[in-house]
Image (cartoon, helix red, strand yellow):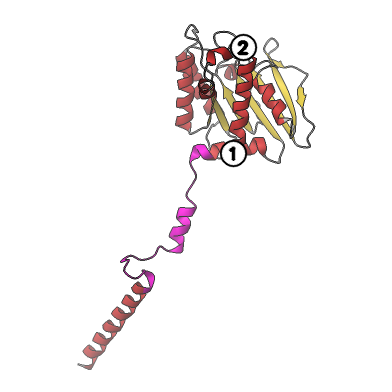
Amino acid sequence: MVLFTQQRAYRADAESARDAGASQEAPAGSGEASPSPSATEAVEEAPADPVEAATAAARDVVNGSEDAVINVLGDSTSNTSSEWVYRWAAELGAEVSVSVHTWNPESGTWFPETRDFGEGERTVTIWNASANEGNPGFPLELDGMIEPEADLTILNYGHWGAPEAVASSLDELLGSLDAGGEGTAPVVLTAQNPALPTWIGYADTNRDAMRAAAEERQLPVIDVFAAFEEAGDWESLLVDEVNPNDAGQQLWADTVTAFFAA
């Protein structure tokens, strides 16, 4: 009898202690326990959106304090010294020292001379592997176009090539760069400017392929197409059916600057 009475007393004490602990953990009237510190920390440490993270990584390369190497793989909209790559380099030269290497399609290597901008202590080196009628298959077929030490790669394709071949080679090129892979250098794609309806280069289809590839691998896109459309009379920004004129190239350069500066 004494043992039964003691057991009942122990159970009563345990229930009272459990009820007291529950009342301390939950706010009055809430009916729920407060989240533990570990649960709160888990929410705060949730990973950022992959595209936003890749965009931030690309901007860190351009705007950081360390020297940087950038590889531009593109077509006729970025291969000459009057086009957006060099205009963007000149704008970067206001803060840093920029050196641009240019691909020589005739020799299949780099021109020995560079175009240099600015005199800052920090150095940004751009390897501009753009070529007339370029498509994503070019860097896969021509040795040396892909700079292995690049901290950032910008792909500027879409106006040239049959859609099936462009989509296939783009996927292969992104795979060779391990684009979107953990710990790899960031890769940014370009949605190129609109072309006239008479252009036979499948600009719209190939632009869609660039966007689709970026979405699949969760990569950022520099939306040059939107910038041209928002400008209003975008046809006045072309020198022919597809290539931007001086004003169009400046808009392109400004769009790239805004993307990396945002």
Going 57% across and 24% down the picture, which residue do you hit? 155
**Is 50 in the magenta?**
yes
Q: CA distance from mark 2 to mark 1?
A: 29 Å
- Disc 2 marks which amino acid? Asn
Span of residues in magenta = 24-52
Going 55% across and 16% down the picture, which residue do you hit? 135
Q: Secondary structure at mark 2?
A: loop
Residue toward you, 122 or 92: 92
Going 26% across and 89% down the picture, which residue do you hit? 6
Quadrant of res 131: top right
Query: Which quarter shows the N terminus?
Result: bottom left
Residue 169 lies, with reference to residue 62, above or below; the image says above
Badge 1: few (under 14), some or many (20 or more) residues near its Cα, within 10 Å? some
Residue toward you, 91 or 8: 91
Residue 29 lies, with reference to residue 251, above or below; the image says below
Total labels drawn: 2
**Is 56 in the magenta?**
no
* Residue linked to disc 1: 57
* Residue linked to disc 2: 132
- Disc 1 marks which amino acid? Ala
* Residue at the far top in the pictured view: 198
Please indicate, yes or no, whether residue 159 appears anywhere in the rendered image: no
* Mark 2 vs 1: CB contact within 8 A: no
Badge 2: few (under 14), some or many (20 or more) residues near its Cα, within 10 Å? some
> In x, y percent, where is residue 14?
31, 80
Query: Which quarter shows the C terminus?
Result: top right
